[in-house]
């Protein structure tokens, strides 16, 4: 009987820890000095995390608060470029990412957009809507 009680208490403790971790993860995020902020129509707030990975590894990693009801990836790119974060993301006339710093699209390697670890159905930054808690990756592959 003693082992059964211990196993039940351990199970309850694991469930409580799981619920507490979920509550912490979903709690309100607050911008800090490193948070990039996009000011749009201010009708909604969306938090995203973004990573840019080039030939030699991570070029940029950060969080962004988008204060807009319908933000797009263009808003994210523009905010990064305007803030002088040490990277410059270039685009063509069709809204496709063509370069990040010196890593330019070539026949063998191109910039691709991943949202929550899934390939985006389009490469046009104007057509890619950004949702709350999205993980965005720009990957040179």
Image: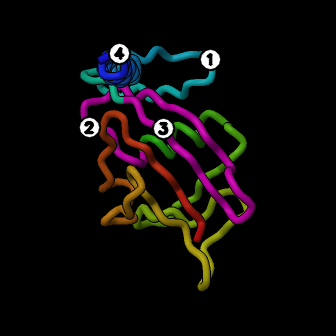
**Residue range of the region highlighted in magenta in the rendering:** 47-74
Q: Determine which residue is flagged by label 2.
A: 70
Instruction: Determine which of the numbered discs, if any, sits on residue 49 in the image.
Output: 3
Q: Secondary structure at mark 3?
A: strand
- State the image quarter where residue 17 is shown: top left
Of the pair 11 and 125, the residue shown nearer to us? 11
**Mark 2–mark 1 CB contact (< 8 Å):** no
The residue at the far front in this view is 1
Q: CA distance from mark 3 to mark 1?
A: 15 Å
Residue 46, above or below 101: above
Q: Quadrant of the N terminus?
A: top left
**Mark 2–mark 3 CB contact (< 8 Å):** no
Q: Determine which residue is flagged by label 1.
A: 33
Q: CA distance from mark 1 to mark 4?
A: 51 Å
Of the pair 108 and 78, the residue shown nearer to us? 108
**Direction from residue 123 to residue 140 in the image, left or right:** right
Q: Secondary structure at mark 2?
A: loop
Q: Callout 1: 10 Å neighbours few (<14), some, many (20+)?
A: few
Of the pair 20 and 61, the residue shown nearer to us? 20
Q: CA distance from mark 2 to mark 3?
A: 17 Å
Question: Percent from the top left, x then y, of residue 82?
Answer: 59, 37
């Amino acid at each position: 009987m003693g082992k059964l009680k211990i196993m039940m208490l351990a199970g309850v403790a694991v469930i409580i820890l799981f619920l507490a971790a979920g509550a912490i993860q979903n709690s309100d995020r607050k911008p800090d000095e490193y948070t990039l902020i996009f000011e749009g129509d201010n009708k909604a707030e969306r938090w995203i995390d973004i990573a840019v990975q080039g030939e030699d590894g991570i070029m940029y990693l950060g969080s962004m608060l988008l204060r807009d009801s319908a933000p797009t990836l263009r808003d994210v790119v523009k905010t990064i470029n305007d803030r002088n974060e040490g990277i410059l993301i270039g685009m063509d006339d069709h809204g496709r990412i063509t370069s990040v710093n010196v890593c330019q699209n070539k026949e063998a390697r191109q910039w691709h957009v991943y949202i929550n670890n899934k390939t985006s159905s389009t490469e046009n930054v104007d057509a890619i809507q950004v949702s709350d808690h999205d993980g965005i990756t720009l990957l040179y592959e």
